[in-house]
Image: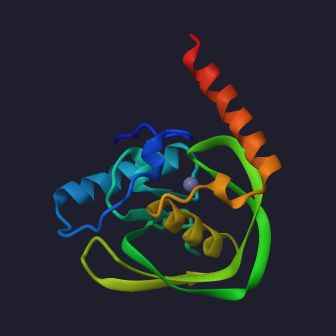
Amino acid sequence: MAVLDVVKYPDPRLREPTFEVETIDEGIAELVRDMTDTMYALNGAGIAAIQVGRLERIFLIDGRVAGGDDDSPPVVCINPKVAETGKGLTIAEEGCLSFPNVFVDVKRPRWAKIEATNLEGETFTIEGEGLLGRALQHEFDHLTGQLLIDMVGMVKKEMIKRKMKRYHATEASP
Ligand SMILES: [Zn+2]
């Protein structure tokens, strides 16, 4: 088990371009295992590889968020593509492992469908509304360098920047 360090805003690595996974090998399987451990350790609904400093286009969604139970493994989305979003817009509170203790209202399409490849190399689609629809869009955004702070107005942007400054100041002190 390896819980990895999560890259936190405003670390510029969160804005790096990501690349497609060409071969799903043992290295990718290990990265997915470590991302799973990290997501569970930090109670995330999802996690993207870029949040642990890797640039492969991979994210995970917690199995419970994806409609399973406590024993469901995370849904592994490799090289995901947003197939469709719709059913109107909805506002709900969102958090992110790269923004500890920050929760802000974000407006997004209610429903999303994503096409991706799993660890076995098979193509699948996952779709949903509510938390799942939101998590799919949030994690996909990470692969394009889009972050929670880009989704809110000026006042909230400043609030998030202040909170993250305080967070890093506290983390740095002994
Ligand atoms: Zn996030």
Q: Return the x and y of residue 148 as percentages of the image width and height.
A: 64, 55
On screen, residue 103 versus residue 1, left or right, reads: right
As drawn, 23 above or below 151: below
Instruction: State how the image is colored.
Output: rainbow
As drawn, 87 above or below 138: below
Q: Return the x and y of residue 46 as percentages of the image width and height.
A: 53, 59
Q: Quadrant of ligand 1?
A: bottom right
On screen, residue 60 versus residue 128, left or right, reads: left
The residue at the point 17 percent across, 58 percent down is 26
Residue 42 in which image quadrant: top right
As drawn, 152 above or below 124: above
On screen, residue 135 versus residue 83, left or right, reads: right
Q: What is the quadrant of the N terminus in the image? A: top left
Q: In the rendered image, is residue 114 in sight? A: yes
On screen, residue 28 versus residue 134, left or right, reads: left
Q: What is the quadrant of the C terminus in the image? A: top right
The residue at the point 44 percent across, 63 percent down is 143
Q: Return the x and y of residue 119 as percentages of the image width and height.
A: 28, 70
The front one of 77 and 74 is: 77
The residue at the point 58 percent across, 22 percent down is 171
**Residue farthest to the right?**
155
Residue 18 in which image quadrant: bottom left
Q: Return the x and y of residue 122 as percentages of the image width and height.
A: 28, 83
The front one of 9 and 76 is: 9
Residue 99 in which image quadrant: top right
Q: In the rendered image, is residue 62 in sight? A: no
